[in-house]
Image: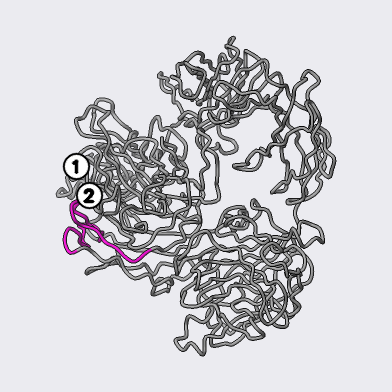
Amino acid sequence: MYFEFGASKLAGKHVLDATFRAYETWSFNCTPYWVDLERTDNISEGTRWPGPKQLDQMGDRYVSAGRGDLCHPEQPNQWVEFNDNPDEPDENLASTVRSLADGRISRLTLMLRAKDESQPRAWKRFDSNAELKVRYVHKPGVPGSVGAIPGTGTKAQCRPSSDPLTVTVDTPTVQASVQTKVEAHEGEEEGSLQAEFVMQRSSTDTTSGTWSQVWSDYKPDSGWDPDGTLEKATTDKRADGGLYRFRARTQSHWSYNGTSGDLFSPSSSWCYLRIDSTAPKKPSIASDGPYTLCTADDCAAQGEPGRPGTFTFTPNAADADVKAYRWRLLTTEASATTQVKAATTNAPVQVKDVTPGLSGTQTLSVEASDLKLDKEGRVRWGPPAEFSFKVGVEPGPTGRWRFDDGAPGSGATVAKDTGEVGTRHDAVLRDQDGTGWSTLARRGAGDYSLRLNDNLTDPARRVGYASTDGPAVNTQDSFTVSAWAYLTDASANRVVLSAPGELGSAFTLYYSSSSRKWVFNRTDQDKADPTYIRSSADTANPPLNVWTHLTGVFDTKGDTDKANDTIQLYVNGRPQGTPVVLAGAAPTYVPWTADRNLMIGRSKVGGAYGEYFLGRVDEVALWQDARTEQQIREENRLDKGGDPTNELVAHWDASISQGTQVAESPEDPDDPAATSFPYHRGGLTLSATGASLTGADATALVLNGSSGHASANGPVVDETGSFTVSARVRLSKALLASKPVGYKGLVAAQAAPGGKESSWALWVAKTPDTDGDGDGDYRWVFGRTALDAGGSVLDTAVAQADAVIGDHEWDTWVDVTGVFDAGRDFTDTEGHQRYGVAELHVGPFLQRGDGDPGLAAPQQGGGSLSVGRGQDGGTLGHYLPGDLAKVRVWTGAMTEEQVAVRIAQPSA
């Protein structure tokens, strides 16, 4: 009898003890017999008799129950409990459940069996209501809100080494908010936590010096605090002029059954500060509209995203030599500073371009400088002053078409406009041969998109498009257009959106076959032979058969002066180049109004229609304003219910495969009757040697670790945007043990252009031994590689597991997931800009191991997508010793909760 348990309820918990209970309802006779509790491999849809492989004994019990008054004394039904016996070292239920809670195994499958199955008198029956009772303590998480308070105020900041925070007191205060690894649910104990602070000083008071510890402290001083408590500690006296760095970690304390212990989270990133009592003091900040200072009793919303605010910066009364200021919005990720000089020493400065990118509370940070240099030759800045204000909610879209109005074959011809502002303009599907609805849709299973023309082979018949009745956007004023495009043919110009006039199109969002780039353009005038003004993508040759988010922004700067009008293209939420000044590119430019309609899938050139799109278009939206970069990234997430949506675009399943290919899965959560995968990627073709579709308990892709692999044509996602990749893998410890330290076994990888590196990869790495067993350690890793124009490695982003692979992870199935979130730009501790973040999940849990997860530049893969091998360090190989059950790829970055629910299977 089998019982299977998922890890979702154990997320973020350290297991102290575990008990398995099963209710015995019948035994063959009144004599007790031994019952074994065995751990087995997981059960799947492909499991065959005699069932999954037995992996380890959890315990045994000598019992008889369930015969009632047929025995003397009576033997009623009863619970039989299995708990580790310290006198029997082979009983390890608690450590196995701990591995489940740690995400090292995806599911725990337990089997009850007679120790001697050849003895009929040992047979028993148990109810299916078995329980797994767990004693646990909350694991500590990396603390939040880590920072230093610059002076005697209350607000803290954390700065990188390239721009240390100036602190004007010699006993600075640092802070951190203690956290559990996973937020405790309401009603649960929220942990017994402390914050541990460590501070180091540079030997030369420059970033090139040697760092040594000079101070540490714990808060609270005694006892423990619950999750979310903000802890503050004041250092002892530090040297004026000294360069310091500090970080914090959370400590979690537990006591159980007469013993106690402590757990520690990984440390936060280093925060850098320099003590300088002579630096300029905090300036004052005054608003000149439209935004107003938030106070404890009043924080009224003003303005809206994209609307500039005007502020005046004035030197502190204690200063006499302020010559410049710099400012930034702290609530904008990767916000750069803007420097302004005073007209004369100590003069106030007014800035008129403080432009919030999102609604809600924003914080303006301003520092003053005397333009003197610090010990590293950089301009020194004083401690920051801060001004918090609330930005009003932006207006909604003037038009939105989700194209979920009809299923394939439904005969529906109208896509409803669900915009929020102004008049609705439904879109009508024109030409029934070339238009229709598709299950390939950006918001995932159950969604639909607009299909355009790629079902037809005759070019003359490829004239399907959709359009509104009447103009949906005023092209004379600022506007933003956005759509998800799935391009299947790049042999000619392919238009996603356009707004026609009498002779031409005021704007066109399209793929250009001549430049081989995505383009957003405007024409100078509505005439037969206009001048085209283009904002083009940074890189050429975008991949086909992938979802790409395109946005075009026309910005009049809120005035009627055409000389400062600009256009800009965004691809996957990222601006391409700099804004193009229209009048500078074409002196004949005027911001003319397109008075016909909005067209989806074609344009108008010289009075004639053409440039029809081939593929899918989804999630079209219009706004009658110039969206900010932050707003465009919010749209790129395509949130539904507060979470980003994801579309499964590739799914290979070995358990249903045979022959020489790992087949695409027909699995569709909303269509169990589906007989083929809608994206039709084709199977993964097995290598001539070292790979087979076999297995004792269920079919898997079995790889020998020296030549076995399988591959298909890639890429399957636009990797300059967000994506998620996951594999269910079973490692062979015996085969990996023969590999040298430093070996990488690639689970799945997408080749980068040139074929020498992988654009992304999931792998297991063998590292030097730390546990004394004589073998190396093993760790899961997800990584990305960016290349320069010559194909050389520019940068890598690496996310690795918190801990090495444990004993319970070998020879059993584990879900390993890599997530690349392209919408999370940040500046690292060295001051380097990073474009997107790589994350690793093992089972349902996000890993926070060492490594730099940020990528220095966007990167698109090209060529083969492989499982069991890949490109790394200029060589092709790195074969995986183990088995693969399935590989899946999604467009969109999953959250930790989505990975747990959709990938790491819950309890069966």
> Callout 1 environment at 10 Å: few (<14), some (14 to 19), or many (20+)?
some
Q: Is residue 290 above or below residue 93?
A: below
**Which coloring applies here?**
one colour
User: In the rendered view, does 96 fall on the left or right side of 841?
Assistant: left
What amino acid is at disc 1? Lys
What amino acid is at disc 2? Pro
Q: Are marks 1 and 2 in contact (CB under 8 Å)?
A: yes
User: In the rendered view, does 658 fall on the left or right side of 602?
Assistant: left
- Secondary structure at badge 2 equals strand
The image's mark for residue 148 is: none
Q: Is residue 183 above or below residue 242?
A: below
Give residue 223's position: percent from left, percent from top: 55, 17
The residue where tag 2 is placed is 881
Quadrant of the rendered image containing residue 65? top left
Residue 713 counted in the magenta span = yes
Give residue 312's position: percent from left, percent from top: 81, 35
The image's mark for residue 739 is: 1
Specify start and end residues of the magenta stretch as a single range: 688-714
Residue at screen point 47% across, 45% down: 856
Residue 876 counted in the magenta span = no
> Callout 2 environment at 10 Å: few (<14), some (14 to 19), or many (20+)?
many
User: In the rendered view, does 396 fall on the left or right side of 678?
Assistant: right
Q: Is residue 674 above or below residue 623?
A: below
Decide which of 884, 86 is in the foreground and name it. Answer: 884
Residue at screen point 24% across, 42% down: 743
